[in-house]
Amino acid sequence: MKVLISGMASWHMDKTAASFEKLGCLSGMWVSSKNRGLPLGKYKRIWPYHLGMKPFYHAAPAYLEEEMRWRSLWLYDCWVRRQELPADVDVVQCPMGSCTPVFDLAEASGRTILKVFEAMNGHPTTQRGYWQREADIYSPGFRIPVGEKVWSRMNREIHRADCVLCPSTYVMESMVANGVSPEKCLLNHFGADTSLFFKRKRDIPSFPKFIITGSLTVRKGHQYLFLAFQKLVERYPDAELHVYGGIRPDFRLLWEKWKTCPHLYHHGSVAQQELARQLGSCTAFILPSLEEGFARSLLEAMAVGLPIIATHESGATTLLDDRSARIIPAADAEAIYWAMRELCDNPALVHSLGEQAYAAFGGSENTWEAYAGRLAEAYRERLERLRGSAQNGLCG
């Protein structure tokens, strides 16, 4: 069995492709990003899309860059439609929005090929609703940078797919809630790089030090976290909150309001090695997302042995529950405050929840290699069923 991965950008898919290559089941990867070590014969760079987006990577405002990702889809489509599907392909796997021209090639081939829609977030209808709702409340006038045609395209891709790859229980639930058959969904959470993120050896800090990683955006619930932290500092004046990640357009005005909050530190994006070091120096990791696929930062924090405060919508409940973490309701600043306060008051709980988070991480069970291995096994089973159904259809 061989898998072709194709997408506008690599996101985490370069790790998936590299792991498939180690397993001997990668046909190739088509992507606009740089090659991250795949054999040249198995990598094609989508130059039209890359060159079309290049002016927006560096010189354009963040909002325009985000919007142009989707407005430039036609460049991706044109390039893919000029390609020939490799003869050894059994499975095509594409992230949401990138599936359409690859599915066209698969269907035109006349072969039975498993078509996989990879859901980076919840169902498009759910994602769109949560995102715009929060923007309406906290960033009036902001319109999410994904046009109507793209949302429609994603819905059609889900309908055409043989398999919807869901990185979390939350994503799978959102798919089913929007009419996708549970049998069509495949649950498989992401992996972590255990060469960078490994269990910390140092003691927990002597003062409360919380951390959140990922872009600042209303979808990730930073607005509720900052409200909770402002209240926490009144009770614990030495508490700190460290925020890592770029500021997205929907949060820029909000950050102007919050950036003077005492002991709230924004660091922007940092190298993975530095992020791993910073995680190891903190009391707990917080992710109050209102809508997410599966935050890879969760696994990274778990691999370090940090206690987790997170929402179901962040993907946390795929591996954690109320006994091994503090699972909080979405959009609830008061719940975030009490979870943080509980850890401030109880160092023994910080230690025990950190141990449970590390145990739930499971070490080698949750590396990128393990992620790809689970996918390969599931794809073989689904491909066999698909080919059996196709054969029965011919016989009928």
Image: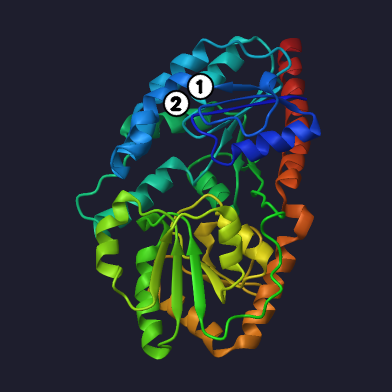
Which labelled disc corresponds to residue 50? Answer: 2
Pick the quarter of the image with the C terminus: top right
Q: Nearer the viewer, residue 60 or 360?
A: 60
Residue drawn at x 49%, y 65% as measured from the top left? 212
Image spot of residue 27 (x, y percent)? 71, 22
Can you say whether 326 is above or below 292 in the image? below
In the rendered structure, the answer to whether residue 212 lies left or right of residue 231 reads right
Q: Counting other residues with Cα less than 10 Å from the Cα at mark 2, is it few (<14), some (14-19), or many (20 or more)?
A: many
Q: Nearer the viewer, residue 379 or 88?
A: 88
Colour pattern: rainbow
- SS of the residue at dot 1? loop
Residue lying at 29% horizontally and 62% vertically, measured from the top left: 255
Instruction: Name the amino acid, label 1.
Output: Ile
Q: Which mark is residue 46?
A: 1
Q: Quadrant of residue 153?
A: top left
**Which dot marks residue 298?**
none
- Tell me which amino acid carries mark 2: His
Q: Is residue 156 left or right of residue 223?
A: right
Q: Quadrant of residue 321?
A: bottom right
Mark yes or no: residue 70 visible. Answer: no
Please, what secondary structure does the residue beneath circle 2 have? helix
Percent x, y of residue 80: 51, 17
Q: Crowding near pointer 1: few (<14 within 10 Å), some, many (20+)? A: many
In the image, residue 320 above or below residue 122 = below
Image location (x, y in percent) of residue 143: 26, 45
Q: Residue at x 60, y 10 (%)?
A: 84
Say which residue appears at 50% left-offset and 33% top-offset.
Answer: 9
